Amino acid sequence: MSGPILSLMIAIPAVAALACLFLSAETARRVALGATLVNLALGVVLWAGFEIGGARWQFVENYALFGRFGWALGIDGFALLLIMLSVFLMPICIGASWRSVTQRVPEYMAAFLATEMLMIGTFAAQDLFLFYIFFEAGLIPMYLIIGIWGGVNRIYASYKFFLYTLLGSVVMLIAMLYMAAQAGTSSIPALMAYDFPPHVQTWLWLAFFASFAVKMPMWPVHTWLPDAHVQAPTAGSVILAGVLLKLGGYGFLRFSLPMFPEASAQLAWLIFALSAVAVVYTSLVALVQADMKKLIAYSSVAHMAIVTIGLFAFNRQGIEGAMIVMLSHGLVSGALFLCVGVIYDRLHTREIARYGGLSSIMPRYAVFFLLFTMASIGLPGTSGFVGEFLSLMGTYQLSTWTALVCTTGIILGAAYALYLYRRIAFGPVKSDEVRGMSDLSTRELWLLAPVAAVVMWMGVYPESFLAPMRGDVAALLRRVDRATPPNDSNPTAGRKVATPTHVASGEAHR
Amino acid sequence: MSYAANLALVLPELVLSLGAIALMMVSAWGGPQSTRSVSIASVFVLAGAIVALAARGAGGGDAFAGLYRADAFADFAKVLIFIGSAVAIVIAPGFFRRTAGDDLRPEYPVLILLSSAGMGLMVSAVDTMTLYVGLELQSLAAYVLASFMRRDTRSAEAGLKYFVLGALASGILLYGISLVYGFSGTTSFDGIADAYRTDGRSLGLVFGMVFVLAGVAFKIAAVPFHMWTPDVYEGSPTPVTAFFASAPKVAAMALFVRVAVEAMGPATEAWRQIVIFSALASIVLGAVAAIGQSNVKRLLAYSSINNVGFALIGLAAGTREGVASVLGYMAIYIVMTLGSFLVVLRMRDEAGQPVEAIGSLSGLSRTQPGLALAMATFMFSLAGIPPLFGFYAKFAVFDAAVRAGLFPLAVIGIVSSVIGAYYYLRVVKTMYFDEPAAGYAKSGDRVEGALLVIAAVIVSPLGYLSIPALSAWTGAAARSLL
């Protein structure tokens, strides 16, 4: 498979975004849907053409267009899966906004297409500065999406989102400039093999951490997320939870671990501590939320903490689990936001207390909502289980205490998710308004059904998703192997049955 | 060296001076109705000056026994200066025609030509005498331009303020020059550099350096010598403000770089502290003070202070990359700032009167989406947010600072840029999130529109394609200095 398919996947949304600005609302919708579907098709071609076990970097393109840095693209298994997630969710976002967005539709579609372009660019970039440009540029369309089409308090949320994430990222730029100056290259694959002195690594790691921790988001810098989610329009929340949060995890995977293995090992305690706090604290906060979107936003913080502990477990289970949690969370929380959007479109409130008894009013809706709630909890058979199980198992091999604390998150997760579902779907129907709500329309069914199918697929046969990244996990582990911290429970190998060698060694000591 | 050879080196300034004198005669006899023809002729004179630069090619050298130097550094700055001046002439007729009160007079383009000749001298000066003469020629023309709308009290106030404070700064500069001359015994930059090399710790030389840099800092509006900027920017007619924010800024910055690197290069360690303080103070003050502004021209004034701070970070590096990054920064900066002022020129109510309140931009994205998009592009670019071209300008200066090992400076500088992002975002918020206010009158001016589109395209991500050419050019310019 050759040809500049990655450039094409970046160019199509860019061209479509520009075109949308000049079109009428109805045409803009169609153009946006068409462009995202073409990108999905190209994504499928990409996956089909991706050679598992082949070269580490595939679909490589490199043009020295910008002097000091270049237009260098290429993907490995991690990037492939995250690009697939982006192109899969994007048509769903456009579909979710088909009827609910009526104001300034051409600009809305242009903003979404720009977001898609920048996300694909971020995952595919093989040049440090190209990555930074795509990574940061994503702030602009998201700022506009929250600020123009958001809820009542949208302006505060948009500022907070923009400035918080910008502040996190700028220090990373200084670190990148230093790295490029030291290593004499800005190519990401070359830097992944470059050994920085350990004391320098610590500083660089912290600079990258500042950016990715905010993006992730990790406790205690997660506070922008609930605001942004609550105020963003439904599709904005889907893309924020589905893909933009994954940039943080991808950053740890692509930069922090392979480029600074010693610093990662040295500071893993920080990640573990913050994640453990996040799992327990944000789960408890989610339990008492009265706003559905806020509840899901806090649950995202908890799930992302499971990702970070898995990534810093320095073993195969942990890293693979973290990747699966990222993919699963992208689908599940995206779908949950869609579910919220469905009933928000009907009643125009996100207050949990206003609903009740939807299982009898909207049976089809209740089924989907139940499936995604269970996937969020991590029920076996859904994607959530695979990821969380692997991730926690990996963590246990490194830090039993962290694994212990974080596993309580599963129980707390079940608590808030089931509690939410009970209040929404069961119980008496509270008002005539609720009674008058119609079940899923065909359009909404088409939005939720594909996500549900993939969630089940990932839960039942995760091999499809594990296979592309297996080689990359192995490469990453070879890279970080020299720094892997010891297990805190100091396991000892089982005692062997006495053999003649025992005698021999005894003699040697004498 | 023969006179002919000397004159050939100063050909661009010669073209400008002779052109200005001839056109002054035309305007004296032709009166106000000659405005149009004088303006057109002035643009051709500026174009002629650029041709004269190009005709000389890569060669260069010192003219008039080491008073004036034609090199790649000066050429780069001059091209920016002449283009900025030409834009200031082109956008003026539309502004004055639609503003009640004063009409445009033929002296306006002539004054800009004289100012350009002064700026040409400034960036080519390798002797403190030429430096001072060039600076004063530029400034005197600028004082008149600031108060060009005689019936507008704000404009008169701007001119007076600029003059008084400018005279003070000139005095400080001249005092510094006299100290440096007294302790080094020469006015030539090379001689001064020798003096710093042999006796860098001499109290007189250090004092002289501080005073000279303070005087130049006034001209680039770096903190703590910035206080004239908001008032002058607000009071001057908008085309003049656009001019102040572009060409003289480049000239003064180039002068600053040449004095620091060529004349005081051996004392880099000494002036670096001054530049670092000034850079950080400009970034922070330019960002914080802009937050409370409600007038768009004052906002852009603080934005220029903020941007000068970033450019100084490149100078603080004191390396060849640093000098190149400052030049690149100024090139990108004048496009962004001229673009922003082109948008400000379009802010007029139905009666045709200029509006300067930021609040009047409310909902512009719905009344004039194209204009709002252009303004948003300039604002994000000034804030240094990728993928706009303003990011590359900041990228280059921070790269130079990091390569020079100035990590704390780079980190503090870039973190402060987030404060600045807030007020640029506020403009975008006003245009995109707020309910529409009374829209602006449509402007039918094609030339302005074309300039606006050109500026927006350069600042857009397409600008990145020009990086190889830009870095080759700024690199060559920096090599001629270091």
Image (spheres, coloured by chain):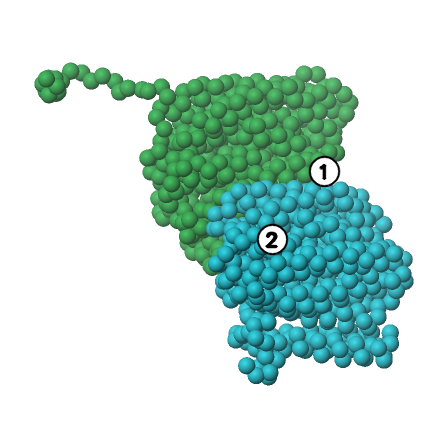
Chain colours: A green, B cyan
Q: Could you say which is closer to the camera, residue A153 or residue A92?
A: A153
The reply to whether label 2 and label 1 mark residues of one chain is no
Q: What residue is at 68 percent from the left and 22 percent from the top?
A: A290
Query: In this rendering, would A290 be left or right of B70?
Result: right
Residue at figure coordinates x 79%, y 46% from the top left:
B294
Q: In this orientation, does residue A349 appear?
A: yes
Q: Residue A431 carries which label?
A: none
Chain hosting mark 1:
A
User: Which labelled disc corresponds to residue B207?
Assistant: 2
Taking the image as shown, residue A76 lies to the left or right of residue B9, namely: left
Q: In this view, does A292 lie above or below B65?
A: above
Query: What is the x, y in percent for residue B331?
Result: 61, 61
> Residue B44: image x %, image y %?
71, 76
Q: Where is residue B100 in the image (x, y as percent from the top left)?
A: 90, 62
CA gap, disc 2 to disc 1?
50 Å
Instruction: Residue at 57%, 59% (x, y): give it.
Output: B183
Q: Nearer the viewer, mark 2 or mark 1?
A: 2
What is the chain letter for disc 2?
Answer: B
x, y percentage for residue B181?
60, 62
Identify the residue at image location x=62%, y=32%.
A225
Q: What SS does tag 1 mark?
A: helix
State the residue in front, B86 or B405.
B405
User: Which secondary structure, mark 2?
Assistant: helix
B25 relative to A16, above or below: below
Q: Mark 1 points at which residue?
A: A155
Residue B314 appears in view: no
Q: Nearer the viewer, residue B87 or A151?
A: B87
**Eyeballing the image, is A290 above or below A192?**
above
